[in-house]
Image (cartoon, grey):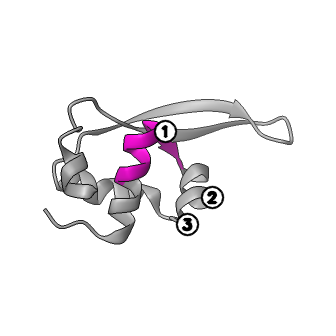
């Protein structure tokens, strides 16, 4: 299957680290539209789950964000993406 550069970078990151947030994607991959990239990978059959996490920002306010996690069993995609 053909992957775009953004999709390839995200897949490699998920294979190495297991999960990613929007802030990780911006700082590590330069991807400002992580949810869109995840959507495209899901359409191609990659099993990525979403979990909501809550934390406190620098102003002491509670914030919620999404962490995307590559499900086990996608290891065979390493050959396709590598």
Q: Secondary structure at mark 1?
A: strand
Q: Secondary structure at mark 3?
A: loop
Quadrant occupied by the C terminus: bottom left
Q: Residue 17, how many percent across, how many down? A: 47, 38
Residue 76 drawn above or below residue 43: above
Q: Nearer the viewer, residue 50 or 69?
A: 69
The residue that mark 3 highlights is 30
Q: Secondary structure at mark 2?
A: helix
Q: Nearer the viewer, residue 42 or 75?
A: 75
At label 2, counting other C-alpha atoms closer than 10 Å, the crowd grade (few under 14, some 14-19, many 20 or more) is: few
Residue at coordinates 40% horizontally, 60% vertically from top-left? 9
Residue at coordinates 17% horizontally, 41% vertically from top-left? 76
Q: Which mark is residue 67?
A: 1
- Residue sticking out furthest to the left: 1
Q: Which mark is residue 51?
A: none
Provide the residue span drawn in magenta: 11-21
At label 3, counting other C-alpha atoms closer than 10 Å, the crowd grade (few under 14, some 14-19, many 20 or more) is: few
- Residue sticking out furthest to the right: 59
Q: Residue 61, how many percent across, how many down? A: 79, 36
Residue at coordinates 50% horizontally, 33% vertically from top-left? 52
Q: Residue 51, how many percent across, how many down? A: 44, 32
Residue 15 drawn above or below residue 31: above
Q: Residue 1, how many percent across, how many down? A: 13, 62
Of marks 3 and 1, the one in the foreground: 3
Of marks 1 and 2, the one in the foreground: 2
Which secondary structure type mostly characterizes the magenta part of the structure? helix
The residue that mark 2 highlights is 27
The answer to whether 78 appears left or right of 31 in the picture is left
Give whichever of discs 1 and 2 has the lower sequence position.
2
Residue at coordinates 24% horizontally, 40% vertically from top-left? 47
């Amino acid at each position: 299957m053909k992957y775009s550069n953004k999709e390839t970078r995200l897949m490699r990151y998920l294979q190495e680290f297991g999960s990613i947030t929007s802030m990780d994607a911006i700082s590590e991959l330069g991807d400002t539209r992580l949810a869109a990239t995840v959507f495209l990978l899901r359409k191609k059959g990659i099993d990525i789950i979403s979990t909501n996490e809550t934390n406190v920002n620098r102003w002491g306010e509670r914030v919620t964000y999404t962490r995307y996690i590559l499900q086990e069993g996608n290891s065979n995609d390493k050959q396709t993406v590598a």
